[in-house]
Image: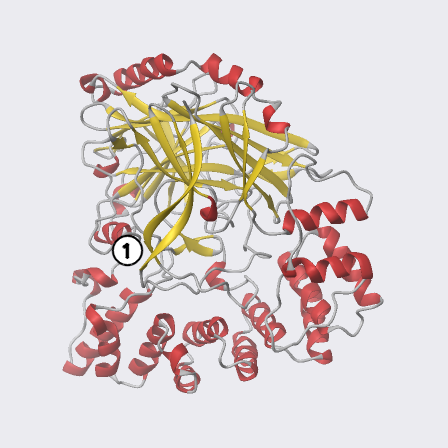
Amino acid sequence: MTEIRVEKILIPSVEFNGVSSLPAISENLRLSFMQNQFELSEDDGLFINYGMVEYGFPYKAQDNYTRNLHDAEQDCVVLENEHLKATFFPQFGGKLHSLFDKNQKRNLLFSNSIVRPCHLGVRNAWMSGGVEWNCGYVGHNAFTCDLMHTAQTKLDDGTPVLRFYQYERIRGVVYQMDFFLPEKSKLLFVRTKIINPSFEVLPMYWWSNIATPDVPGNRVIVPASNTYTARDSHPVKIAVPEYNGIDITYPADNVISIDYFWNIPNEERKYICQVDKDGYGLVQTSTKRLKGRKLFVWGASKGGDRWKNFLTADEESGSYNEIQAGLAKTQYECLPMPPKTVWEWVEAYGAIHMDPEKAHGSWSEARKESSLRLSALITEEDMESLLQATKKMAKRPAEKMLFRADGWGALEEERRRFCGEDALCGYLDFGDTSAEQAPWLSLLKNGTLGKHKPDEPPISYMCQKEWTNLLHKAVAEADRDNWFTWLQLGLNNFITKDYEQAESMLVRSMEIEPSPWALYALAILSRDRGAHDEEVDYMLRAFDLRSDDISLAKEVLRCLYSNKRFEELRKAYQRMPQCIKDEPRCVIYYAFAMLANDDIKGAEEILYKDGGILLPDIRECETITLDLWIAVQKKKAQEKGTVFDEQKMDPPAFVDFRMFSNAEWLNGGEIIRE
């Protein structure tokens, strides 16, 4: 019998400490993507760079967390039958935390034993482990550390269904995931749908990211003979399984942090599995809509090992890799989703048992064996039939709400009702609006965002074109003298890259009522056009208005550090409250200012304090801790009249987050040119 139940798990967790006070337009939040240059054939037909999003705005950054752990009860929902126990975290994007094979008494996933985020997500915070669901645009999406609407329903035969859903504000779409574990099934199913309610073609993205144990001897098997990867920051295609002397299908053997996007032919079944030396492991398969599969590895390097451990408990290696499934063939692209369209698919997750000699034999033999074993679990035809058989269930209202999320879906439903448009999604209950949506409800119904104090952080932002149009109307009428509305309109124009209009609107906001938020946005505008003296001036003026704001303090010091204005950095830091001075990112910027003032001892004390400096929010690919260590070594060498040789350096592990220190391996192999 299948059971669904809500539980609590006691797990060491950090405090998230709310969200940033600033709009999410920092350089530190800019989303990177591929260069336009690429070495692919016209037959590959990839949508390289299509639909890229530069920032997570209008969402606010989640960047105030620490690394300090305490035991905390986390809500979870469990789906369980005779063979599998699936545990989900609604508050972390509906993450599948663990998938326990009761027959073998083994977890099929890598599950993080703690709740400890780091800066790898669109909004900064992201956590390793389990299976996460990324909708809309490239990156670990806005809800990876946020609550999903969570409900319960059932299949026609009474099998319980766990439903997660959300309204995604950047794309303006709804996505929904219905999980079910039929009686006696050895596979967990998730039926996903993305709903485009607009009359526009939208760039669309989806990747299911599956963390699996990174153990020597584990092999990833997919029905592909070549794979896309990135070399010199642009996509190329290489052969599978061997590249430049390494069998890349063994995650632990890869020497650098790298993505492999397996080029599965259209006629082949869509699946990926990872098995151990005994041929046992996890298989993921789907209906045809999800045509992409990927392997991500941290790489056999000091930096890769450092990252894996940094994301988990200090006493654990945290060793894992990811196998993934997506709409497109790579994550360098989105796909065009037609207007008024629903995209649907079914995924299945479960244990696979393969003949170990075949699983670790030739590539063709491994592919054949995995295909046969998967078909014994479920056929491709059965998957497609299941998609059709559950179509009505996926359109029915839920029977019971388990957890309520934010009110943005409710606001969009209200906007549509008020404007005489079709409902967003009539069968999904988005609940009620809250304080975050109150200014926008006022704009919708009264033509004004209302009164707001300039010394208080804006409660929320929006950038959807319908709201932008209402903002334009408001500043022409009721809100012509409202600093808050001009600020919102200026940010909307910044996001659409109409920088001239953005600047004039932000200046107008300042003329009406000076605020640190408009000054901050003007600083970012100045940064983007290369006017760095103006950038520094605006940042310092913003700081003068709100010197006790930790979000702003980090950005002010980041700006001064980036522009090498170390004396101003030192002065700004010294007048900050002690609680902000103690913030690790502020401390490390100050260490660079100390070095600029030849205070080597002071900078070194910061570097090695408590066993080595730790930045809770160090970003993927960021090397600032290593940069500080190198800067200290150079100063010490200079003091002795010698020169520090970076080519021969051996930095301590706590500073070294480099992911590509062996990049010459990738650049040395042959690529496929057609």
In which quadrant of the rendered view does residue 282 lie?
top left
Quarter the C terminus occupies:
top left
Q: Position of residue 388 (x, y in %)?
A: 57, 18
Q: Is residue 366 above or below residue 563?
A: above
> Which residue does the image show at 50% across and 57% down from the upper left?
30
Question: Does residue 356 appear to the left or right of 119 in the view shown?
Answer: left
The type of residue carrying mark 1 is Phe
In which quadrant of the rendered view does residue 131 lie?
top left
Total number of numbered labels?
Answer: 1
For mark 1, give the secondary structure. Answer: helix
Residue placed under numbered mark 1 in the picture: 310
Q: Position of residue 380 (x, y in %)?
A: 45, 15
Question: Does residue 305 appear to the left or right of 47 in the view shown?
Answer: left
- Residue lying at the far right in this picture: please name it: 477
Q: Nearer the viewer, residue 28 or 72?
A: 72
Q: Position of residue 546 (x, y in %)?
A: 54, 80
